[in-house]
Every structure is written in structure tokens, then in C-alpha cells.
Image (cartoon, helix red, strand yellow):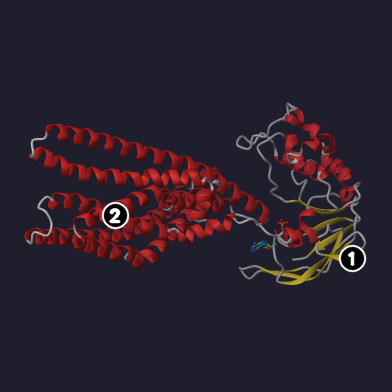
Amino acid sequence: MNFKTFYRTSPLRIWLIVISSILQPFILITTSYLNMLQISALRNHNQKAWLTIIIVSLLAYLSSYFCDMSASYLLATHMREFNQQLREKVLRHLYDEKRNYQVTEVENQLTNDLNMVNDQYFNLLPTICVFLGYIIFSVIALLTINWTLLLITLLTVLISMLLPKLIDKPIQRAMENVSIKNRQYLDLVEKWLGGIAELQRYAAGDHLMSVMHLGAKRLEEAKLRQNAKQQILSIITGSISQVMIFALFVWTGVLIKKDIVPFGAIAVIGNFSHYMSTGIEYLPYYLGLIKGTSVLREQITRATLPMKNHSESESSEVPFSFKTKNLTIKFQNGETLKFPDIEIDYGEKILLTGDSGAGKSTLFKLILNFLEPSSGQIEFKNQNGEIINPDLTKIGYIAQNSILFPSTVKRNITMFNDNLNNLAEIAGKEMDLQADNTAFVQGLNTKINLQKLNISGGQRQKIILARAQVHHSNILLIDEGTSAIDQTATLKILHQLLQRPNTIIFIAHNFNQRMNNLFDREIHLNK
Ligand SMILES: Nc1ncnc2c1ncn2[C@@H]1O[C@H](COP(=O)(O)OP(=O)(O)OP(=O)(O)O)[C@@H](O)[C@H]1O
């Protein structure tokens, strides 16, 4: 993400912003010239000329405000469009990447990181133009008076432009640090405030306060350090500009004394040196801020790049069967799980059991490649029994904590594919949803309110199971998909699920013998 992408959003608008921004210093510096003429007219008692210049100056000032307002309005419009495009690209990237993201990571990217880059990079475009204009037009004005005055000024500009290079690394680090601390703080908010009811139940408010206080303190300290670094940059560039003004006045005095420049130049120099010093003080400061965003901009660019894995998915095939060999996984905390070799044929109905913590859910995650095995492999085959590069997205998966969306029951089943509406009605019946008519007053058109949690755990599971029924997959992995559903309904649901031709591997703890008998075989994992 750089200025080029920003420019491409609307080149015409960018040019208008640049022109209206550049016009502001041009008008102000031209008016300074007019002021000099105004003083001469007053000394010569030329009231008409004096009044004309005052009116022209007034109009010039008004047009300068107009330019300022136009630039701000155009920039705001541009930013709105640009940010919208950027957010869409980030979301497209996340969606295509199929990686498990932490919600806070994405939240931070779409809000805090983007705001920082907006404030300290793109929003500075008019400001940079104005300060650049101050320097350029002052240089031209000084040149008309005496070239040696210009020389002194140019030298100072050069020094000030090189200065931020000395300090842009610490500023970059400080900015990154604020972003990290902000992410950590959002993470705390999500993890701790997400469980506030539990904390209230056990009266653990003091601990919540101290954890949140520490997170907020770290964030504020990082901001303070960033501010201090920016202040240092501001002080360095400010001091240089003051030295320059002093040198300019002294040298103008010398030139006047030697009759090289007219006496009136001292008044004009005062104005120009002010514009010049403002330009020199702030331009490197803002350029320093812009440089400071480079790491964040790179991060955002990476998050917006389109994913190029289409060729991979094109060559991959839908899996029908698989076998595992010497599969182990070692977690970061040192815990290691070893799995027996398993071979599953197409159409088998497998009950996967084992003690709590034996690794049943982990096995599913390994099959789906959500987790990488430390050793061993999984071999997938197609319909003809040939080994394939599998398209793992075609494996159906019902996780323990499957997600519902704030929409109707039906759309949660069809996953927003209205062509599947009729199938949703059938799957709803198969998964015994009509037994919950009192909760679903409008049937499948009842809207799920995630805030008010207007559905029970069992109803949630039935909706997720119906979703899997409607979106047929050759291999379906179900992790405790009926744990909250009563026994009678579970039996009914199992009958429906297991009569389909696809492969089903079902993790369950609490099945009775009658339910167990519905499966072809049981695989038991030992700890
Ligand atoms: N990402 C992880 N990092 C560290 N340890 C993990 C991770 N995922 C799982 N484990 C550990 O692996 C072991 C197996 O976990 P898993 O969830 O697969 O068990 P399970 O057989 O499905 O248990 P349950 O029946 O209680 O759901 C547990 O001891 C768990 O703590």
C-alpha cells in the first residue's frame, strides 16, 4: 500500500487536491508582495492604490480559505473510497487464505492500523503540498531579492530534509509498538470481557480490573513513548529553522548596509522567512511521520494481496477415502499425541470414541490440515482409489463450537444460497427442528438473535447438522454434534444422517448401545 494505489483510486481528484493545496501558499506569499506595495502606496499617499491592494489582499485570503476547504472535502471523499476498497481487499484476502484468524488481529488491522496509516500518511498529502509550497514560493521570492539569501535558505532546507533520516527508525519502532500494544489490549478485552458473566458469578472483579488496568497502562505508555520520539524530531527540526531565521536576518542587515538590497527588503524577508521556517520546520517532520508508517503499510499491503492459490486448488480433487500412517503431533507445551494407523473407506460410518483429551478433535484438525502433524502422513484417495492432492474444503466438518450467523434459521442452514431453500425444509425436518416450534415461532424464517441467544444448545446443533445435510460432502466429520440434544431426538437424527451414502466419522461420548449399533465400527483412541 503506497501512494500509487492511493492515486489510482481517482487520479483527477488527487490532482485537484494537490492544486488547491499548492494554491494556498502561492496566494499567501503573493499577498506578502502586495503588502510591500501597500506600504509603498501609503508612504506615497496613493489612497486609491492602497485601497485596491487591501481589497485584492482580502479576496486573495478568502480564495485561500476556499482552496483549503476544497482540499479537505476532496481528501475526505477520496479517503472514504480508498478505505472501502482496502477493507474489501483485506476481507477477500482473509476469506481466500483460509487461515484461522484471531478476530482481534483482523479488528486491529481494519481499524487501528488503517487509521494510523490514514492519519500519518495519506491525510498528510495537502499538508505536505502546503509546506512544500511555502518553501518553493519563498525561494522564488528570495531569489528576486538576492541570490545569497536564497543560498543560505537552500542550505538549511537540505539539512532539514536529511535530518529525519536520523530518527525515522526509532519512530517506526515506536509506532509498531503502539500497534502491538493495541492488539494485545483488544485481545484482553475480547478474552476477559467475553467471560464477564463468569467473573461476576465468582466475584473476580478485582482481578478483571487489574488485568485490564495493566493492558491499558502498557498501551498508554507505548503511546507516550511514540509521542516523545515525535517531539524530539519536532524539537530538532524546530531548532534548525530558528537558526536559519537568525542567519537570514543578520545577512539581510549586512546586504542593506552595503546597499546591495533595498531597505524595504527587511519587511518582506520577515514574512518570507516565517513561511520558509514554517515549511522547513514542518515538512521534514511530516516526511518523518510518513517514513514511520512504512512497516505498517507493508503489513497492510500483505493483508490486501490477492491469494494466488487457484492453480493449486484446480489440480486438487475431492477426497472419498483416506488413511493415516504414524501420525503424531507435538504441541508447543511439549504434549505429544500419537495416533493409531486408521483406514477409512468411502461410505463407512465410524464412531470415534476415547477418553477426554485422547486427541479425537485433534485428529479431525489434522485431517482438515488445520494443524500440521509433527510426523507421519495422511493419504487421500479419489473415487477410483487413486492417491490425490485433496481439496480439503470439500470435507464437511461440524466443530464443537460451530458458528451461527445473525440471520434466519433457514439462511443459517443454506449458508445464504437461496437455491437450497427447499432442501433446507427437508433437512430441518430430518434434524427434528419442528420439535422446537415454540422457539422458532416463524419456523425456519425465525431470525437468530445471537445477542439474546434465543436458541438452546440443542437447537443450535440441529441447525448445524441440517447445514451439513444440505451441503452434501463425501466425508463428514462431526465433533460431538448431538451432545446437547435429547436421546430420542438424537436417535432420530442419527437414523437420518447414517442412511446417506457418504463417509461419516462421529465423535461421541454419551451414546447408548442402540445408537452405537447404528455405526459400522468404532475406533477408540487411548490416551
Ligand atoms: N493447540 C493446542 N495446543 C496445545 N495443546 C493442545 C492443542 N490442541 C489440543 N491440545 C491438547 O491435546 C490433547 C487432546 O485434545 P483434544 O481436544 O483433541 O481431545 P479430545 O479427545 O477431543 O477431548 P474431549 O473429548 O475432551 O473433547 C489435550 O490434552 C489438549 O490439551
Q: Position of residue 167 (x, y in %)?
A: 35, 65
Residue at image point 23% right, 59% down: 241
Q: Is mark 2 within 8 Å of ligand 1?
A: no
Which corner quadrant of the figure contains ligand 1?
bottom right
* Depth check, front residue: 452 or 174: 174
* Depth check, front residue: 294 or 443: 294
**What residue type is disc 2 on?**
Ile
Q: Position of residue 300 (x, y in %)?
A: 53, 56
Q: Position of residue 35 (x, y in %)?
A: 18, 42
Considering only order in the chain, which callout, 2 or 1, is on the residue closer to the N terminus?
A: 2
Q: Of helix, strand and loop, which one carries label 1?
A: loop
- 160 sits left or right of 438 in the view: left
Q: Of helix, strand and loop, which one carries label 2?
A: helix
Can you identify the residue that label 1 sits on? 386
Please identify the quadrant where the C terminus is shown. Answer: bottom right
- 192 sits left or right of 357 in the view: left
**What residue type is disc 1 on?**
Glu
Point out which mark residue 418 bears.
none
Q: Is mark 1 within 8 Å of ligand 1?
A: no
- Inspect this view and state whether residue 36 appears: yes
Quadrant housing residue 495: top right
- Closer to the camera: disc 1 or disc 2? 2
Residue at image point 91% right, 51% down: 517
Q: Position of residue 472 (x, y in %)?
A: 84, 47
Quadrant housing residue 369: bottom right
Point out which mark residue 135 bears.
2
Say if 15 sits above or below 520 in the image: above
Residue at image point 12% right, 39% down: 41
